[in-house]
Image: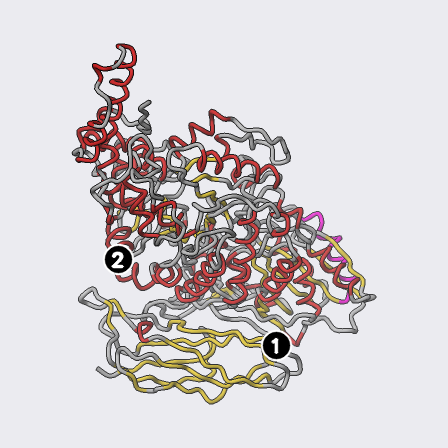
């Protein structure tokens, strides 16, 4: 019997390419039609014609090293004619050899299916996150795999056993019931925790405040382990946008305003997530999970702070700021995601200069790139650079060498017809599919893509809890501490906990529905901490107001609670919601995706609550729980102590208690500067030279107007600047040395300094190194972070800290539009962005 798996190829595909001799040999080997019974003859003839229709589809691809000649039979594309094992099935073969062997076996339809995102709900009912029914829709599964089978969105909250069932059913069908047996990537979120009831860590902006790359790498390792056991193979993180536009709702998802810190933290995340190898994977596999760096690129600075609005800038700003974190963190990431916005008038999703010239050619990035959800359709409905799905698909594929995520009209389904019509060149499809296959082989999925039988052993382990606790405490920043108000001493008998952030768990966005049920509120955290140490300190609680209301009817109770206590802790801030509620009409939030602000001050009655409590006459500590900087200079000027807790994880309520009582010495530093008002933004520290003239005015506490020029009644100087963060101990810096102090344009060097803990308690300090290019051919930043290291120093102890710096970190994008290290003098300082502890010069010679 003759069979031909055409993969759904249409006769119209036949005009796109030529046949080759191996196909003719196959046809000539068939028995003569006239020697058969008429019915069988007609049946065989129909089969042959079907094969003829599909032959061109199987032989057209020649991109990225695919061979012209084929060595497999059309009746069984997954086997070789000579009976040998196909290279793509050989786990010992190189990744490139396996890709090159598999691609020409694929029909156009199979190729297109590989680069369109499917969805787990195609064969599973996932509407109820509590339902544990383990049944599936066979027809839905088959249709999903046929059209959108390369990657499957699986970012649902559902019982773990049901999730494992769903992934196993899908992978088994693809591996055992499709012609070529290509497994899928199963995708989920993991920005600060695996989102199917995995451990929720602090938001990225919070973890960045730790300045601890090793710890962040461990966090990412936990996220990968929890997802891997359930059969997930791709995580949509990290986010490497820069928090330079603070009105934008997604500031909390980033690692701050600085490109160097963002790159280092991003690299730590990618390394921690991908390091290792799945069980039973091939020896050539290089990762156990595919990270997905996003959003490529220049997405975090939208005009007016409005989500997905245009980003303005030129080539120099693109390369020196927005691209550097991606170049540092993502050249080895197994996936990238493109951005929604346009940059300099060109949508990122169809920007050939960005996605092909820079990413694929300059950086030689070899792995899979995907669009964001629905972003190809935005070329029609938002950017208006296309008037049809065909145009949009062609622009995204040919300019971007990228797959299409769901969330839109699936424009890539037009590609087979466009190839047949000659409007899309199949080489771009082949190049894109090649990147997808390379990512899958790099993960070792062809050997064993299934969830682990002991998946429960990978989820929410004691070791994960320990890492969570460490990142919680190291991410808290002490901003002010007048008269050593903190930590709370042994002479305190009662503490007032006041404010709308006390009796709630506030997570950032990109967490699962009801994730907060796993968290500890500050009220419970204080009680737990005090119980753990058998402390007699009494906790008095009054909410005072809601986060989202101007109602002050609770103020009297709050003031009375403060007066009845020895010290008052007022917890206020912003709030976000989980991924279900954040997009539900009628809910409210002040941060998160598509939640943008025109005012960075506290909402509602919160500031007035702080003032009322402070007026009660007791020492007042303000804790800001937020996803971005809060612009309230009154707090800095009047509170006895100020603590910043960017959105925490599940142990945030316990961690803040440990900091307040001194069980843990705060060591966090600000990854983003705090403006005095929204009108003084942007406020990032590494502005170009000459860009921040200071001639401030002010409105004094008694209402007097003091006029200035920059600004008339305010100041461009931040309340607290990047890198700021206090400790319960003190540190002294001495003996700064740059070695060598004179280098060529290609030499690396080291900045060393001795740091002594001059206080009475152990403490961790973040040693920060900043560089200024004193004279350059183009305008450069007034200063730029080039290195940091977190060190733990016992009371009275000291350590010598050496931080390596690459010569490439001195480069400028010069007048000839090329990277160059220019000879001259460079000033280096250790300190923070607004403080100098020690400084020295480096000379670069030609």
At x 59%, y 83%, the residue is 757
What secondary structure is marked by label 2?
loop
**Residue 763 image label:** 1
Q: Is residue 806 visible?
A: yes
At x 47%, y 39%, the residue is 153
**Residue 175 image label:** none
Q: Which residues are magenta?
A: 552-566
Magenta-span inclusion, residue 553: yes
What secondary structure is marked by label 1?
strand
Rendered-image quadrant of the N terminus: top left
Residue 696 position, x and y percent, is 42, 69
Give the residue pinned by disc 2: 314
Q: 713 or 750, which lies in front?
A: 750
Residue at the extreme top of the image, as rendered: 38
Judged left or right of residue 434, residue 724 is right
Judged left or right of residue 796, residue 121 is left
Q: 240 or 727, which lies in front?
A: 240
Which numbered disc flags the more N-terminal residue, 1 or 2? 2
Location of residue 542 with respect to 469 vertically, above or below: above
- Magenta residues: mostly which secondary structure? helix
Q: Is residue 577 visible?
A: no
Q: 79 or 273, which lies in front?
A: 79
At x 53%, y 84%, the residue is 755
Residue 146 position, x and y percent, is 39, 30
Residue 832 position, x and y percent, is 47, 75
Location of residue 669 with respect to 525 vertically, above or below: below
Residues packed near mark 1 inside 10 Å, few (<14), some (14 to 19) or many (20 plus): many
Name the image quarter holding residue 80.
top left
Mark 1–mark 2 Cα distance, whole angstroms, equals 43 Å
At x 71%, y 58%, the residue is 525
């Amino acid at each position: 019997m003759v069979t031909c798996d055409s993969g759904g190829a249409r006769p119209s595909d036949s005009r796109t390419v030529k046949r080759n001799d191996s196909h003719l040999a196959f046809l000539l080997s068939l028995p003569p039609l006239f020697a058969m019974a008429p019915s069988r003859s007609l049946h065989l003839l129909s089969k042959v014609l079907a094969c003829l229709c599909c032959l061109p589809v199987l032989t057209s691809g020649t991109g990225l090293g695919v061979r012209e000649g084929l060595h497999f039979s059309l009746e069984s594309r997954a086997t070789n004619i000579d009976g040998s094992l196909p290279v793509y099935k050989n786990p010992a073969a190189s990744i490139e050899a396996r890709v090159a062997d598999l691609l020409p076996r694929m029909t156009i339809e199979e190729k297109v299916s590989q680069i369109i995102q499917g969805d787990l709900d195609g064969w599973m009912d996932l509407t109820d996150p509590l339902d544990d029914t383990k049944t599936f829709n066979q027809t839905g599964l088959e249709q999903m795999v046929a059209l959108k089978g390369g990657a499957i969105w699986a970012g649902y909250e559902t019982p773990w056993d049901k999730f494992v069932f769903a992934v196993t059913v899908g992978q088994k069908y693809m591996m055992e019931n499709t012609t070529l047996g290509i497994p899928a990537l199963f995708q989920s979120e993991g920005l600060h925790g695996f989102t199917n009831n995995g451990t929720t860590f602090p938001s990225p902006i919070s973890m960045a405040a730790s300045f601890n790359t090793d710890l962040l790498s461990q966090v990412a390792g936990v996220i990968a382990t929890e997802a891997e056991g359930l059969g997930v193979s791709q995580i949509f993180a990290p986010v490497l946008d820069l928090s330079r536009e603070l009105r934008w709702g997604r500031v909390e998802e980033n690692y701050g305003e600085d490109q160097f810190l963002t790159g280092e933290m991003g690299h730590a995340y990618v390394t921690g997530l991908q390091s290792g190898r799945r069980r039973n994977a091939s020896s050539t596999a290089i990762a156990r999970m595919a990270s997905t760096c996003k959003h490529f690129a220049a997405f975090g600075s939208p005009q007016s702070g409005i989500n997905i609005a245009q980003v303005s800038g030129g080539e120099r700003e693109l390369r020196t700021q927005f691209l550097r974190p991606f170049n540092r963190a993502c050249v080895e990431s197994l996936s990238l995601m493109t951005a929604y916005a346009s940059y300099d008038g060109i949508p990122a999703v169809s920007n050939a200069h960005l996605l092909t010239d820079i990413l694929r050619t300059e950086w030689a990035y070899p792995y899979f790139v995907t669009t964001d959800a629905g972003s190809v359709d935005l070329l029609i409905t938002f950017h208006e650079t296309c008037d049809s799905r065909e145009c949009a698909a062609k622009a995204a594929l040919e300019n971007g060498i990228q797959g299409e995520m769901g969330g839109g009209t699936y424009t890539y389904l037009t590609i087979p017809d466009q190839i047949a019509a000659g409007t899309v060149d199949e080489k771009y499809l082949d190049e894109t599919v090649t990147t997808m296959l390379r990512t899958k082989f790099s993960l070792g999925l062809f050997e064993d893509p299934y969830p682990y039988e002991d998946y429960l052993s990978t989820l929410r382990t004691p070791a994960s809890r320990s890492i969570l606790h460490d990142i919680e405490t190291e991410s808290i920043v002490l901003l002010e501490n007048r008269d050593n108000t903190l930590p709370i001493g042994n002479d305190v008998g009662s503490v007032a906990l006041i404010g709308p952030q006390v009796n709630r768990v506030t997570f950032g966005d990109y967490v699962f529905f009801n994730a907060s049920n796993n968290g500890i509120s500050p009220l419970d955290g204080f009680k737990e901490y005090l119980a753990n140490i058998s402390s007699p300190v009494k906790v008095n609680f009054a909410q005072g107001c809601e986060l989202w209301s101007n109602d002050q009817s609770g103020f009297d109770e709050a003031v009375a609670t403060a007066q009845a206590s020895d010290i008052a802790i007022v917890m206020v801030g912003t709030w976000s919601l989980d991924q279900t509620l954040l997009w539900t009409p009628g809910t409210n939030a002040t941060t998160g995706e598509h939640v943008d602000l025109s005012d960075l001050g506290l909402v509602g009655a919160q500031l007035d609550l702080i003032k009322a409590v402070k007026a009660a006459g007791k020492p007042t500590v303000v804790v800001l729980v937020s996803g971005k900087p809060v612009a309230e200079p009154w707090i800095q000027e009047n509170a006895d102590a100020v603590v910043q807790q960017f959105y925490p994880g599940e142990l945030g309520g316990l961690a803040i208690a440990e900091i307040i009582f001194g069980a843990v010495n705060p060591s966090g530093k600000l990854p983003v500067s705090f403006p005095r008002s929204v009108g003084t933004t942007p406020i990032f520290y590494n502005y170009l030279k000459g860009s921040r003239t200071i001639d401030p005015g002010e409105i004094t506490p008694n209402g007097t107007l003091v006029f200035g020029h920059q600004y008339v009644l305010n100041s461009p100087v931040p309340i607290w600047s990047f890198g700021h963060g206090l400790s319960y101990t003190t540190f002294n810096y001495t003996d700064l040395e740059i070695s060598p102090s004179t280098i060529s344009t290609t030499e690396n060097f080291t900045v060393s300094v001795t740091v002594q803990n001059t206080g009475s308690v152990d403490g961790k300090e973040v040693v920060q190194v900043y560089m200024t290019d004193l004279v350059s051919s183009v305008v450069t930043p007034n200063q730029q972070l080039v290195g940091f290291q977190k060190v733990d120093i016992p009371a009275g102890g000291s350590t010598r800290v050496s931080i390596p710096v690459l010569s490439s970190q001195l480069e400028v994008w010069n007048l000839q539009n090329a990277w160059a290290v220019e000879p001259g003098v460079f000033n280096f300082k250790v300190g923070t962005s607004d403080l100098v502890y020690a400084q020295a010069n480096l000379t670069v010679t030609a």
